[in-house]
């Protein structure tokens, strides 16, 4: 197999940074939800934080496997306050749409470089982003329905509190 190009490695390193930023953003949202007593929402965000770190490591391991050099860049400071649970989840959804755009740009780069192995590896991320957007969008819809109903919010908090992180080796769908 042809060695991976410097350009591709650099783009993947930038995506490692973006995934770690996503983890940081969601951990900051977990802290926001903890600060307003919504432990279930905070749990959901903690699971998301763990998932994002596995996304970063999936790319890290791939770069190493291809003989590229992983480089870690500074992680941007995430926001720490949101107006409401709804604005936090709207932010989550917009963020994921943005990540999808980045993944699609990586796919286009892999295609233009005729780097079929990277193209193939990225297909996992293409599918994952469909799920990421759908998950966030579903919670945005629920929060819009709930509006100012405190009971509805507490019921959703209980639902989100049930989410558990599933390590990759135990999740055969990944
Ligand atoms: Fe790593 Fe939320 O996409």
Image (tube, rainbow, N blue to C red):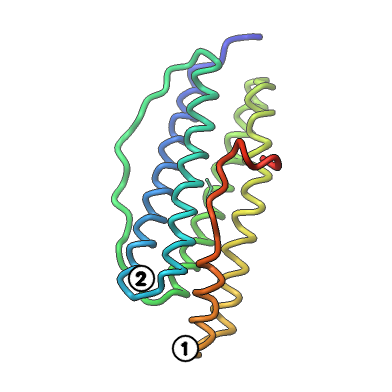
Numbered disc in front, either 2 or 1: 1
Please provide percent x and percent y for residue 104.
62, 41
Image quadrant where one finds the C terminus? top right
Q: Ligand 1 within 8 A of label 1's CB?
A: no
Percent position of residue 5, x then y? 53, 16
Q: Is residue 11 above or below residue 67?
A: below
**Residue 33, quarter of the rendered image:** bottom left
Q: Is residue 116 left or right of residue 8?
A: right
Residue 82 is marked as: 2
Q: Position of residue 52 (x, y in %)?
A: 48, 45
| Outermost residue toward the top in this view | 2
Q: Look at the numbered disc 1 and give the secondary structure of its residue.
A: helix
The spot of residue 78 in percent (x, y) is: 32, 54
Residue 75, image quadrant? top left
Q: Give the residue drawn at x 32%, y 60%.
A: 79
Residue closest to the eye, 170 or 48: 170
């Amino acid at each position: 197999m042809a060695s991976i190009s410097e350009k591709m490695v650099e783009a993947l390193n930038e995506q490692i940074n973006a995934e770690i930023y996503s983890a940081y953003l969601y951990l900051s949202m977990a802290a926001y939800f903890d600060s307003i007593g919504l432990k279930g929402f905070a749990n959901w965000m903690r699971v998301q934080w763990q998932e994002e770190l596995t996304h970063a490591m999936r790319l890290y391991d791939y770069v190493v496997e291809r003989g590229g050099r992983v480089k870690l860049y500074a992680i941007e400071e995430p926001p720490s306050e949101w107006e409401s649970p709804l604005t936090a989840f709207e932010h989550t959804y917009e963020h994921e749409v943005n990540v999808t755009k980045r993944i699609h740009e990586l796919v286009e780069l892999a295609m233009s470089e005729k780097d079929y192995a990277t193209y193939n590896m990225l297909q996992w991320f293409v599918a994952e982003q469909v799920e990421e957007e759908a998950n966030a969008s579903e919670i945005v819809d629920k929060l819009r329905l709930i509006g100012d109903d405190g009971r509805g919010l507490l019921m959703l908090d209980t639902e989100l509190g049930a989410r558990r992180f599933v390590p990759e080796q135990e999740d055969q769908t990944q």
